[in-house]
Amino acid sequence: GRQHPATQVQVVVRALIPLMQDEASGLASDAALALRLLSRTGTATEDFCDESFLLSAGRAAGLSELGLASGWSHLAREASILLNNILVIRGNAFGVGAALPLRSELRAEEHIAAALSTPDAVPLGQLVAWSRIAFRLTLLPPAADQGGAVGASARLARVLLRLVGWVAKELHGAERAARTQLLCLCENAARSGFNCLRSLGDAALAASAAEQVAAMLAVEPVADAPSATPAGEDAPLREAQLAALQLVVAAPGGGGATCLPWRAVVSLLPPLLRGVSERPGDRRLLVPLLAAQRVAEADKAAAAEMREALFPEAEDGGGVMGRDPNAPLGESAPLGALLVQQLCSSDTIVKRAVGEMVLAVCGGDVDEFVGVAGVGNSAGLLAEKGLLGAAA
């Protein structure tokens, strides 16, 4: 496809669309596969942006005004991937409104929510595919039903959040292939739920999200998991947990933070802190930092435990000025040292986030913060917050 002139690809696309729509031809699934491949070539954009093509792909994937078709045929599988590709192309052209025809013509949110609400009865591949479509739908402004009833967007949000907890349960003892799909499903559901929490601002929904996140954080890593690091870290699980943790960060006022296992939250920090210099601009680090800060601010007992674990009294802090932030840290460096090092980071966003987290762990006590980090490392944040004069 990439070697064909755009006009020739356009002719092929227009010939394949009616074939995909005609299941009786026996060529519908092959046409959907061909269209899926062509959708990745960057050509025939006008056709892939067409609303009628979007709706045709949705119907081929199993959507209709009456519901989502049962079963997971080859046509439905190929068409659902094509549908997601079309939504990406339309998103580049039309922004957040790319999926609007699926809502207005096929009631997609309502039907996808119904399908995802019974995950045990749906093939895992289908759950993953529809969770991708759900993500595109959650970019739309929330939809409300007539008469002021709970909107389809809110129902979809609740289902997506429950999926995170369901994945956590299913991961226990899952085989390798299923584990990979489950972690992908968790990431899709969490990112979609993040959009919902930001747009809906529902406190009850936020509390429910925190419970699901806590369950996901409790999942133990698997040393021989696919893509495990040489250190034995389960990288795919860590990425899924980071995606889930965004739900707490997105919640209004950090709702539900007290139910998070703080040890699991801070365990996500070391590989991200060590990679700051290698991946400048990587904002994943902010998620566990903000989550740990919210736990410490909401639960003083947890903050005291974190303070003791991260900055033990007996540890050598490098004197009054604190550790030299430019001194190299080995692979075995404790988490507290990695955090203090970033208090003088050239990345102002990371520096501020680390400082706020460490200050929260210190219970907001300026003198304790200075005692942990040293005068030199703590001065920047305290000056920004107007607290420099509060230090003894």
Image (cartoon, rainbow, N blue to C red):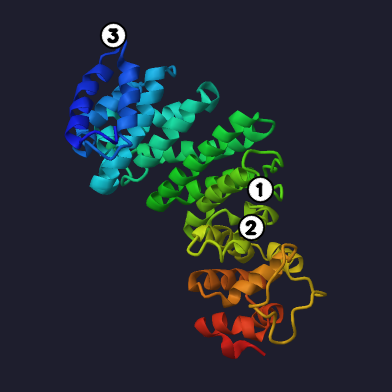
Whole-angstrom CA distance, mark 1 to mark 2, is 10 Å
Residue under label 3 = 24
| Residue in the image at 68% along x and 77% along y | 327
Check the image and report above or below for 369 versus 183. below
Residue under label 2 = 271
Q: Earlier in the sequence, mark 3 or mark 2?
A: 3
- Residue 57 point in image, percent of width and height: 29, 27
| Residue in the image at 40% along x and 41% along y | 135
Instruction: State the image quarter where residue 381 is shown.
Output: bottom right
**Dot 3 alpha-carbon crowd within 10 angstroms: few under 14, some 14 to 19, many 20 or more:** few
Residue 359 visible in the picture: no
- How many numbered dots are placed on residues in this image? 3
Query: Mark 3 belongs to which amino acid?
Result: Ala
Pointers 1 and 2 in contact (C-beta within 8 Å): yes
Residue under label 1 = 229
Query: Mark 1 belongs to which amino acid?
Result: Thr
Whole-angstrom CA distance, mark 3 to mark 2, is 53 Å
